[in-house]
Image: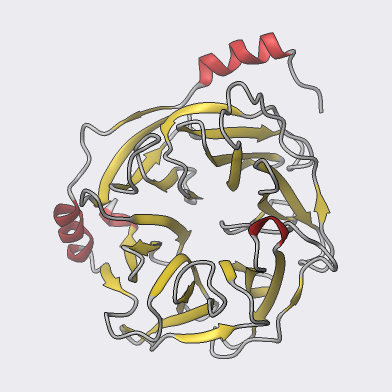
Amino acid sequence: MLYLSRTAAAAAIVGSILMFSQSQAQQPSDFTAQVTAQQGRVDFVFEDERPFAQCHASTIVESEDGTLLCAWFAGTEEGELDVGIWLSAFRDGTWSVPQRVAKVNETPHWNPVLFRDPARGTYLFFKVGREIPFWETNWMETKDNGRTWSTPVELVAHDQGGRGPVKNKPVVLSDGTWLAGASTEYKQWDAFADLSKDGGVTWERTPDFAMDRAVFVGRGAIQPTVWESAPGKVHALLRTTAGKIGRTDSEDGGHTWSPMYLTDLPNNNSGIDLVKLEDGRLLLVYNPVGLKQGRSPLDLALSADNGKTWSTVAHLEDEPQMEFSYPAIVGTSKGIAISYTWKRQRIRCWQVPLAAL
C-alpha cells in the first residue's frame, strides 16, 4: 500500500485530527441511574473480601450462552511472583467467586485478554514473565462458557517480548482474519499488528508502526485498540507517552499501516479500549487527562464519524487522586459491557443496554 509523502501526510493529518467535547457529559450518579432504569447494571465483580491484595488490567467478554466472563491479574502487587490470572462469571444475576485460572510458573502474570470468535469459540490470552520486555504470551480456550479451561500453551514458540494481543481484544475482520493490537517495551515502546488467518494456530507479525520520535516524545506508543470500518479498512488508537492518544490506519486489512499521528484526545500514559457498534458508532473508554495527571476521571466517549470527532457520554468514575484505569469494553447481546480497575482493590463492571446510550 502506498502512502503520502511525510509533508503531504502531515497536512492530511491536520485536517482529520480527532476533536472531542465534554460539555454534555453525565456525572457517574446520573449515568448509573440511566443505566439501571433501562435494566442495566453497575456492579463490583467482587467485594472487599478477596484472596489477593491488589488487582489490575481486567478484560471482559460475553460467551456463547450469554455468560459474561471477566478476568484480571491479581496477587500481592503488580509484578510480584505470586501474581496470576483470575476470573469470575456473571450468571443468574450474580458474579461468581473469583477463581485463579492460570499460573503457569512462579513469575508474574500480566494483561489477560478475553476474546470470542463466534465461529470458533472463546479464548483467554495473557503474558508471563519476570520482566515486561521479555515476557511471553500464553493462551487457552473454554468449551463450556468459562467453567473450565484448556492447559495454557505458548502463542508463538520461543517468543520474548509479546506476540498477539497485549491488552485489548482482537477483532474478527470481514474476511475472518483475527487482528490483534500488539506492542513491545524493550528500551523504547513500539506497536504493531498481529494477524492470524487460521484461528490462532499461526500468526503474522507486521513491522512496527512508523512513528516520528520528535512527535511521540518519551517512550513511544503501545497497546493498540483496533476496529474495522469497512472491509479491509482498519484503524487503531494507541496509548502514548506524548500526552495524547495516537492513531494509525490501514487500507489492506492490517498488513501495512500509515505513520502514527496524534489525535486531540488526551492520554496520561494509561490504557484505553474501544468497541464498534453494529450501527458503526464507536465507543471509547479512557482517562481524559494529559501527562502528569492521575487516572481519574474515567470516561465513556462516542464517535459517529469513524473517530474523527468525539463527545463524552458520561464520567464512569470521577474521584480526584484515585485510580480508575485499564478499561475493557465489548459488545454484548444487550448492548455493551465495560470493566476496569477500581483503586487497584476491585474490578468494576457496567452492563449498559443500548437504550441507555
- Give the residue at x 45% y 43%: 281
> Where in the figure is residue 182, as x and y percent of width and height?
67, 51
- Give the residue at x 48% y 49%: 274
- Give the residue at x 58% y 28%: 216
Q: Is residue 158 left or right of residue 141?
A: right
Instruction: Please tell me which residue lies in front, 200 or 164.
Output: 164
- Give the residue at x 38% y 89%: 97
Seen in the picture, residue 97 relative to 48 is either above or below; the reply is below
Tally the numbered discs: 0
Q: Is residue 80 left or right of residue 298?
A: right
Instruction: Please tell me which residue lies in front, 335 or 148.
Output: 148
> Where in the figure is residue 149, as x and y percent of width and height?
63, 86
Quarter the N terminus occupies: top right
> Where in the figure is residue 353, as x and y percent of width and height?
32, 61
Please indicate, yes or no, whether residue 113 appears anywhere in the rendered image. Answer: no
Please indicate, yes or no, whether residue 172 appears anywhere in the rendered image. Answer: yes
Q: Is residue 88 left or right of residue 2?
A: left
> Where in the figure is residue 57, as x and y percent of width and height?
47, 63
Question: What's the coloring here?
Answer: secondary structure
Seen in the picture, residue 192 relative to 93 is either above or below; the reply is above
Q: Is residue 307 left or right of residue 149?
A: left
Which corner quadrant of the image does residue 151 belong to? bottom right
